Image (cartoon, rainbow, N blue to C red):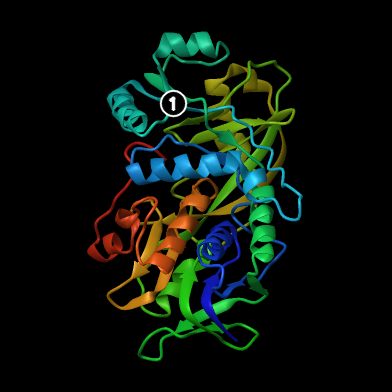
Amino acid sequence: MHCDVCVIGGGIMGLSTAVFLKRLDPGASVRVVEPDPTYEFASTVLSAGGARRLFSRLENIEMSNFSIGFLTRFAEEMTVDGDPPDIAWREEGYLFLVPPSAVAMLEANGRVQESLGVEIVIMDRAALKRRYPSMTVGDVGAAVLSPRDGWCDPSAVLQGFRRMARALGVEFVRDRVVALDDGDGPVRRALLQDGPPIEAERFVIAAGAWSQPLAASIGMPLPISPMRRFEHYFATRTPIEPLPFVKDLARLAFRPEGAGYTGTVVNSDEPRGVNFELDPSHFEEAVWPALAHRFPAFEATRCLRSWAGLYEVCELDGNPVIGNWPERHPNVYAVAGFSGHGLMHAPAAGRGIAELIVHGEFRSIDLTRLGLGRVLRDEPYPEIGIL
């Protein structure tokens, strides 16, 4: 089997890359290799579906600006055969809370965000309490609200991209890529677990939490590890005012969902590795105390459902690796390591890789600083005070 571009991974990042590739170069033959078309363990479908602009690095803010705009017009962008997808986009905002020691940082980040057109509202403790009277604010120094941000149905987004990719002529192979083969020269083949190798001119590693071993097969240093995270659906009988997506620096993150809420507390020290086993104590020991502290109404909350998914953590700095390896294998591209931000940045990242393949450069957003170069130089480029 031969194609122009072999995309390894049919999740949200691989699908976005394939769609934008076909839009930029309709004549290109693009083949996506994905072992599980049910997406049972895909990080996207197990996520909370949030999309925000509250970042400190220009590249992440600009990717969010494009991607959130894309999500808001997703039905128009992804209509196939007159059938527009419904991703249930809810523009209800993001709210970041910081302690007094981080107020200057929040304000500095806010200036960067506003310079890129992000609408934000910075609130001191009193203003925060007036806006959200059920919240405990005694330990909060300030907060920032981005009212134009929100969340959506992540599974619907993934399926919308997949359906559009098929309509554009992308081919799908149900198999697992186990290695790339460079044969002591250019990479020309992807070796499959069950089927014959796929020969291609270019390869895109978009396998999420499973990306690192594929890169290692050709000596590419991709510092990405799978890390288990939990998500919980819970409810409370005590009425609360309408809330945005609430986050704090202690990694509490939750939002409204139907008649209840969905959220978690992420443990950054979670052992690395592919693990989907549930921890029945996580909600009671980690999430419930954080919720009850911030909103006393959650003292009587009930956890109705829990599930586990994976973050694809970039161990260098928490930011993704987006780009190719010009010095050794210029025809191999990585778009992975989004550390929980994959859904919100997939449209922009997929477009960026497509531009790099078709034009040889980023044309819409300069993502050079998120490339492999910083990994090779061991120069972290982390977010500032934002997780």
In percent of width and height, residue 340 lies at 50, 48
Q: Nearer the viewer, residue 300 or 239?
A: 239
Left or right side of 374 for 66? right
Residue 43 vs residue 324, the one in the foreground: 324
Tell me which residue sits at (76%, 55%) in the image. Answer: 81
The correct choice, above or below, for 137 with respect to 211 in the image is: above
The relative height of residue 281 versus residue 7 in the rendered view (above or below) is above
Whole-percent x, y for residue 151 in the image: 60, 37
Q: Residue at x 57, y 75 (%)?
A: 29
**Residue placed farthest to the bottom in the image?**
183
Question: Can the viewer see residue 281 in this picture?
Answer: no
Q: Amino acid at mark 1?
A: Glu
Percent across and percent down for residue 180 are 47, 81
Q: Which residue is mark 1?
A: 119
Query: What residue sits 72% from the left and 43% below the top?
Result: 86
For residue 150, above or below residue 188: above
